[in-house]
Amino acid sequence: MKMAITLALPLAAILAVSSPLQAKWKGGKPGAWDQENTGTQVTTALSDAEAATLLFMREEEKLARDVYITLFDKWEHPVFNNISGSEQHHMDSMKSKIDKYGLVDPVTDDTVGVFQNEALSTLYNKLIDRGDVSLEYALYVGGYIEELDIGDLEKAIAESSHTDVVRAYKNLERGSRNHLRAFVGQIENLGIVYEAQLMPQEEVDAIVNSAMERGQNGGRGAGRGQQHGGRGAGRGQHGGGR
């Protein structure tokens, strides 16, 4: 059986104004003290664009976490519970960089579904409405979020000149690829052929047909394969991992 579920929520339309990946942030960007290495040294401040992206990614990771928490409450499918825990680690990673660079955390209320960014708030509600239709739609929502996250992280990496921030983004992107593998695996367990929603189909296929990735906060995920990628491998698992 083949099913294609189109969310019709293009990032450019939803985040046309609010996304710092497309518009500069106007907040401050003070430097911070860095004692990660020997001695004490002043950390080079982030540019306006880098600061805006970091703050946005903090809330986008919260979006993923909150959607998965809500969908787990609805469907009780373990993939949502496991991956929501991973998204919390991703949120924490962004928070550590926000603190390091002396920025103001946009997550002032950690309640599920609450966002400072109005576009993310709107997107959250649309994704929950879609995921409420059926388990299949809910799993597709997971795939949508991970495709969205991968695309935004690729832009963030390309625009950042700070190696520690780039490293953090790459760890998150590794985790998102594993999460996408997990959601696609669960969808295909239901006899549904997954069709890409935001990324080119060939890029999604390349990800889900490759091995799970390991690394710091990268996410092991589950649902595709363990040491060997490819469709048909390891689909019965439900992990989210880091």
Image (tube, grey):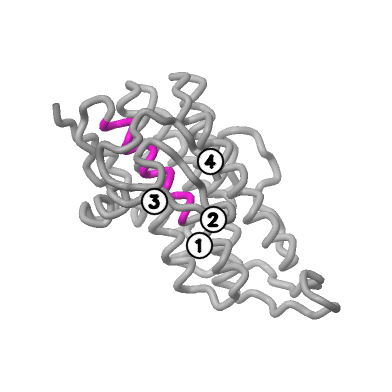
In the image, residue 12 lies at what x, y percent?
Answer: 35, 57
Q: Is residue 56 above or below residue 238?
A: below
Q: Which mark is residue 241?
A: 4
Of the residues tagged 3 and 1, which is closer to the observer? Answer: 1
Q: Residue at x 24, y 34 (%)?
A: 5
Q: Earlier in the sequence, mark 1 or mark 4?
A: 1
Bin the neighbour count of mark 4 within 10 Å (Cα to Cα): few under 14, some 14-19, many 20 and up.
many
**Distance Cα–Cα, label 3 vs label 1:** 15 Å
Q: Which range of residues does the magenta coloring cover?
A: 174-188
Of the residues tagged 1 and 4, which is closer to the observer? Answer: 4
Instruction: Name the residue type under label 3.
Output: Leu
Q: Nearer the viewer, residue 180 or 133?
A: 180
Instruction: Name the residue type under label 2.
Output: Gly
Q: Which mark is residue 215?
A: 2
Can the viewer see residue 130 in this picture?
no
Q: Which mark is residue 170?
A: 1
Write down the quadrant of residue 184 in the picture: top left
Q: Is residue 124 above or below residue 207?
A: above
Q: Earlier in the sequence, mark 3 or mark 2?
A: 3
